[in-house]
Amino acid sequence: MVGAGEVPEGLYYSREHEWVKIEGKLARVGVTDYAQSKLGDVVYVELPEVGKQVKQAAEPKGKEMEIGAVESIKAVSAAYSPLSGTVKEVNPSLQERPELINTSPYNEGWICVLEPSALEVELKQLMDAKGYTDYVKKLE
Amino acid sequence: MEWRLLPLRIDDAFTSMAIDEALLKLNAEGKSQNTIRFWRWLPSTVSLGWFQSVEREVDLGVAKKYGVDVVRRITGGGAVFHDYDGELTYSVVCKQSDVPTDIIESYKFICGGLVCGFEQLGVKAEFKPVNDVQVNGRKISGSAQTRRWGSVLQHGTILISPNVRQMFELLRVSPEKISDKFIASVFERVTTVEREIGRKPSFEKVREAMKAGVEDSLGIKLVEGEITDEELELATELKSKYASDEWLRKR
């Protein structure tokens, strides 16, 4: 795979390769096309618990920043939250069809919906589509 | 760069899994340095990948009959039979930033040390993506990885002289398949150090070879060190999780 894959406009992106879609007061979260291509075929997704308080990913990483984990044929990798807040909803389809992360990372493969606790401040830490594309280019 | 090398340990599966997780957690928190260790499973054990179903993968009746433990790992991958007499196992724990970001590249990086170690033993092996080390197309080592909290745990097998027949009795392979012909076909796909060099080296000798291989290939210095009290305490805490029925039957 070359470059960042699909990077839709209008979403926000984290350095940990998560995307955020603002939906009113809530934020829908998933992993990027680039991330899914790097993970390879996803075989299991552990979802976060509804009600879990999470923190925006930063260094050093901690458990309180995790919104579950994704197992691909290669490894079990943590998914890190792009925002702080409370998990309001998780994607039940991923239990039966974890491959949605690969086939539809920005739509059917979403991971959870958060109620952000510091949206305005934290959005500034995230990238727009162009910023993320450049970020991935530097990684390649 | 210096990494710590722990002494060869022999533990039950639950202790070993707990030590690996403790090293990972404390490494992520900056309290444990990058570490590599070699160890053995006593009693012999079937380990399951993080998401696998125990009923589907293991014949618990046969496991009980042979006194073999069954444990779920926190790493991905498939079910593996670990023979006390035939396998040396390794674990690597390090910061994610100390290995390539790409998962396959990171396997290649760490397995490169094993390849070099096998060479020291007179076995010409090569890395085979995703996560195997092979000799002429036959697997001699398999690895699994997890990335949590900003650190990486990779552990895997080094096959010295495992009991292949027992392996297939334990893992759910249908009985009619466990014929001499089936075992023969397995020997086409799997190999061991003993088979490649015609004798069984001691575990200590394999460890020494792997130590030298890792130092050469990864360009690091391994310094012999002990496990810390903090690591052991956390491992003791985590052990009950791995030994619990709830964890085993998670899926």
Image (cartoon, grey):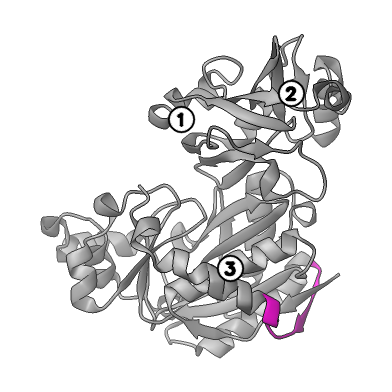
Label 3 belongs to which residue? B20
Q: Quadrant of the C terminus of chain A?
A: top right
User: A131 or A87: nearer the eye?
Assistant: A87
| Circle number at residue A4 | 2
- Chain assignment, label 1: A
| Circle number at residue A98 | 1
Relative to B108, is B18 above or below? below
C-alpha span from label 3 to label 2: 34 Å
Task: Give the residue drawn at x 72%, y 11%.
Answer: A8
The stretch in magenta equals B219-230
For badge 3, the amino acid type reads Asp
3 and 2 marks on the same chain: no
Indicate the quadrant where residue B54 lies: bottom left
C-alpha span from label 1 to label 3: 27 Å
C-alpha span from label 1 to label 2: 21 Å
Q: Position of residue A95 (x, y in %)?
A: 42, 31
Left or right of A120 in this view: A8: left
Task: Specify few, some or many for label 1: CA neighbours under 10 Å numbering under 14, 14-19, or 20 or more.
Answer: many
Q: Position of residue A77 (x, y in %)?
A: 60, 44
For badge 1, the amino acid type reads Pro
SS state under label 3: helix
Q: Is residue B129 visible?
A: yes
Q: Is residue B227 magenta?
A: yes
Asked if the residues shown at circle 1 and circle 3 are in contact, with their CB atoms under 8 angstroms apart, the answer is no
User: A20 or B103: nearer the eye?
Assistant: A20
Relative to A3, is A16 above or below? below
Task: Give the residue drawn at x 66%, y 49%.
Answer: A63
- Chain assignment, label 2: A
Q: Which is in the foreground here, disc 1 or disc 2?
A: 1
Q: Which is in the foreground here, disc 3 or disc 2?
A: 3
